[in-house]
Image (tube, rainbow, N blue to C red):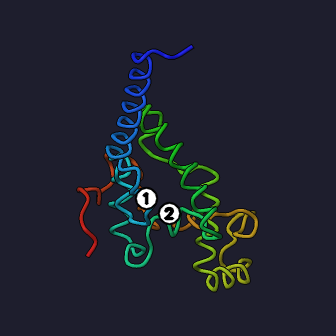
Amino acid sequence: MKPSKFLIFSALGAFIFAVGLFAYTVHASKALSYLSSDPKSCINCHVMNTQYATWQHSSHARDVTCVDCHLPRTSETDKLIAKAIDGWNHSVAFTLGSYDHAIKISDHGAKRVQDNCVSCHASLVSTLVSNADRYHRFDDTSVEEGRRCWDCHKGVPHGKVRGITTTPNNLGVKEVL
């Protein structure tokens, strides 16, 4: 049985429409920017303006980008997998509006950030761990036992106030000089 020309043209039209819709979605969402390390890609969605603005005013803005803290440093494959998982979770939350105004990092993301803090500040962490009994053990947890760096260093690098509308340095996105 030979397919009719109408069916062939309809299928071809539907395919072209689907490809066009996909290309438009990739362009409109700036999807390809997420493959870069540019911090501006993190503010494609206005929800992250507070995090970007507070990072800009931090000491980390001079030398560290978002991906340096928030993505694994073990391999490019691990980095791409984490970007894909986070990208999916972010796109679902932002599209459906199912996020809190005070955005909180996931447990998986927090582990990556903690690992990167310890990695970048390895000599400082080893000093802290060796002196924990004298200076940095205020309760029953330590860095070795699960205490996170930002338990004490709350303002690094996003400031202490995390709400979308309540952050003093969130006066709009500015270029980092």
State the residue at coordinates (56%, 64%): 150
State the residue at coordinates (43%, 59%): 160
Badge 2: residue crowd in 10 Å (few <14, some 14–19, many ≥20)? few
Expressed as whole percent of the image width and height from the top left, the position of residue 85 reads 58, 48
Whichever of labels 2 and 1 marks the residue nearer the N terminus, that label is 2
Quick one: quadrant of the N terminus? top right
Q: In this view, does 87 lie to the left or right of 40?
A: right
Q: Is residue 4 above or below residue 78?
A: above
Looking at the rendered structure, the kind of residue marked 2 is Lys
Q: In this view, does 128 lie to the left or right of 104?
A: right
Spatial CA distance of label 2 from label 1 is 6 Å
Which one is in front, 170 or 147?
Answer: 170
Looking at the rendered structure, the kind of residue marked 1 is Lys
Q: Are marks 2 and 1 in contact (CB under 8 Å)?
A: yes
Q: Which mark is residue 160?
A: 1
Expressed as whole percent of the image width and height from the top left, the position of residue 11 reads 44, 24
Expressed as whole percent of the image width and height from the top left, the position of residue 92 reads 49, 37
Which one is in front, 68 or 101?
Answer: 68
Which one is in front, 5 or 88?
Answer: 5
Q: Residue 6 carries which label?
A: none
Q: Which mark is residue 154?
A: 2
Q: In this view, does 125 lie above or below 34?
A: below
Quick one: quadrant of the C terminus? bottom left
